[in-house]
Image (spheres, rainbow, N blue to C red):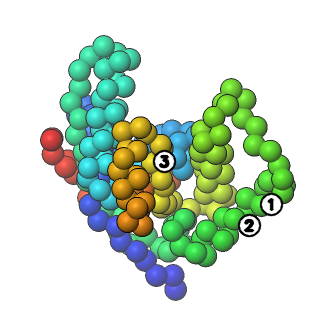
Amino acid sequence: MKYTEDFYNLSHGTDVESARDICLNGFEIRGDATSWCGKGVYFYDMKSKAWWAANRKCEEIKQQKQIKVEPIIILSDIINIYKDDIFDLRAKNDLEQFETFVKEVLSEGAELKVSGITDDTERKILLRSMLISFYADKIKCKLVIGNFRQRPQPLYEHSIEFANSLDMIFGIETIYCVKDVSIISNVRLGGNR
């Protein structure tokens, strides 16, 4: 029999109005193949990252709709999910299977060409997102977990240099992308900041 795993107190950043809707009606799968891991509901295991996402979403709403909304986080658990329903990019076996899949999809030496995007980092991020999304759909997983390096930002340059000088890892975040909302339980407000 497959064993199960549990993930508690995962944080999702959003705005207050969306949080009320989620608490009443549950989460909805959103996004597209260009999101970090494709369509899904995204969670962090660090509240500070969820607050960052909530603030970013509220700023986007403010710019688009010219209204001010308040950020909030939602806490949720994923319990008793079968290991076979998880695509974990941190696990050697899962990563090796994904590598085999990618090599089958892309021929060796194939150039990455994405129309309209000239920055190599952005092209790699877009390709990674699409491949993870396509693979997750193919294997019908319910949860994708991965450690991803934050996009380069001038704000962090000094901190990255300092961390590198001590052989420490900086700017890595763990993302939980839920592909099947039925695995989300114990949805509750995490509080305003």
* x, y percent for residue 114: 72, 35
Q: Upstream in the sequence, badge 1 or badge 3?
A: 3
Residue sitting at 79 percent across and 53 percent down?
106
Q: Look at the numbered disc 1 and give the secondary structure of its residue.
A: helix
Residue at the extreme bottom of the image, as rendered? 1
Q: Look at the numbered disc 3 and give the secondary structure of its residue.
A: loop
Q: Upstream in the sequence, badge 3 or badge 2?
A: 3
124 relative position to 161: left or right = right
Query: Which numbered marker is on residue 149?
Result: none
Q: Nearer the viewer, residue 26 or 18?
A: 18
Q: How many marks?
A: 3
* x, y percent for residue 52: 30, 41
* x, y percent for residue 129: 59, 47
Residue sitting at 51 percent across and 81 percent down?
2
Q: Which residue is mark 3?
A: 40
Q: Which residue is mark 1?
A: 104
User: How many residues crowd around disc 3 within 10 Å: few (fewer than 14), some, or many (20 or more)?
Assistant: many
- The C terminus: image quadrant: top left
User: How many residues crowd around disc 2 within 10 Å: few (fewer than 14), some, or many (20 or more)?
Assistant: few
Amino acid type of the residue that numbered disc 3 sits on in the rendered structure: Gly
Residue sitting at 30 percent across and 38 percent down?
54
> In the figure, residue 115 lies in which quadrant?
top right
* x, y percent for residue 155: 36, 39
Amino acid type of the residue that numbered disc 2 sits on in the rendered structure: Thr
Q: Look at the numbered disc 2 and give the secondary structure of its residue.
A: helix
Q: Nearer the viewer, residue 97 or 169?
A: 169
Residue sitting at 80 percent across and 60 percent down?
104
**CB within 8 Å, label 1 to label 3:** no
- Check the image and report above or below for 90 versus 133: below
Q: Which residue is mark 2?
A: 100
Amino acid type of the residue that numbered disc 1 sits on in the rendered structure: Glu
